[in-house]
Image (cartoon, helix red, strand yellow):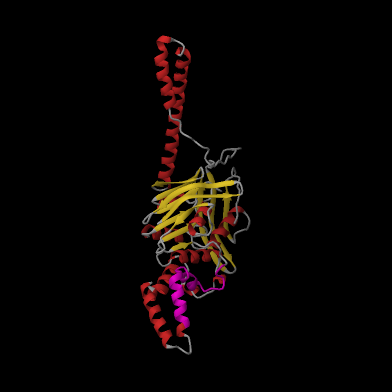
Amino acid sequence: MIITENVSLRFGGKKLFEDVNVKFTPGHCYGLIGANGAGKSTFLKILAGEIEPNTGTVTIPPTLRLSVLKQDHYAYDEVPVLKTVLMGNGRLFEVMEEKNQLYSKADFSEADGVRASELETLFAELNGWEAESDAATMLTDLGISEKLHDKLMKELTGGDKVKVLLAQALFGKPDILLLDEPTNHLDIQAIQWLEGFLDQFENTVIVVSHDRHFLNRVCTHMADIDFGKVTTYTGNYDFWKQASELNQRLLADQNRKSTEKAEELKAFIARFSANASKSRQASSRQKMLEKLEFHDLPASSRKQPYIGFEITRELGKDVLSVENLSHRFEGQEILKNINFSLKTGDKVVLLGKNDLAKTVLLDILAGKIAPEKGQVTWGITTTRSYLSH
């Protein structure tokens, strides 16, 4: 459980949060959402104790273990992969290191024996005997093959480093898990594994993500940063969106009705306040006017995305045809007899474990490189644009 009380934070003259009071309870996964620049990552750092708020407190029971997804992909470059994951459970790792140091001493004393016995008890309580096996299984499930477990982190690709740091954060069943954009640079298989893991996770999770499908899949609650506040909603992203939009429409509608009623009452008062026979009615309407409620509707920090395309000519029915496409890279065949076609309105996602093959295929389709074999034919009415990596 994490509780914030009257948390406020300013950077320079900009207010990010003011008097934030929110409780994150066990057994729930909270999606932390908000506009770019609203302070999602900053709020996570406040919860993690990495940033001190200007006012207020963050309370986490001292018996609970907090785990945070690390963002520095170079921090563990000189550490073996498996050891990096084990370091995610700080207390267990300290016990393991002290044990190893004691047992490696040439002059093992009686006092060392007593301390070793204490450490062995702690080691067992922290599930130390299964730790390496659990860490290795988690790495394998995320797509880090066993042959990489003893490699140094600096020998891994950027994408594999992300997976190792994710395994580090998840390792050892932490009581509270803070994840900032955990799906970035993950392939579809790793994302699906993470969704399944969080679905079974029984403790508290707070996650920042721009992936709406992921938030819908894993979140039980949403925590929305807007108007300098953090408001929690029960349900996933789609439910939050519908509920918040409905709430804003209801408040706006109530304001409109109150405004219309106020104009009606003001008109009656102005017309009959000097009329002795109507003065009591005018006085009654004045009281009604004073009791009307108007809801504050501050401007949201969100901006609705919009991309406009000017159509210069209609797209034909046949958009793309790929026939018997094959290509080799550094002597290895990565594309073999690829055949497919696209029609108007089709939308396609390229999936696969071989990132190089997907990139090469896109480069071929974009005309950046020529295939060794096969034919790529675009419709005569098509125009194309390519955002490369």
Looking at the picture, does residue 334 appear above or below residue 302?
below
State the image coordinates of residue 102 (x, y, percent, origin top left). Answer: 46, 83
Magenta segment: 75-101
Give yes or no for residue 93 being in the magenta stretch.
Answer: yes
Front position in the image: 82 or 120: 120
Residue 208 visible in rendering: no
Quadrant hosting residue 73: bottom right
**Is the stretch drawn in magenta largely helix, strand or loop?**
helix
Q: Is residue 82 above or below residue 60?
A: below
Residue 381: percent from the left, percent from the top? 59, 42
Q: Where's residue 249, x and y in %?
A: 44, 34
Between 156 and 49, the residue placed more toward the observer is 49
Residue ID at (47%, 19%): 266
Confirm whether residue 120 shows in the render. yes
Number of marks: 0
For image coordinates 50% across by 71% down, the residue present is: 84
Q: Which residue shows up at 51% across the image and 45% down it? A: 228
* Magenta segment includes 151: no
Residue drawn at x 47%, y 13% as measured from the top left: 271
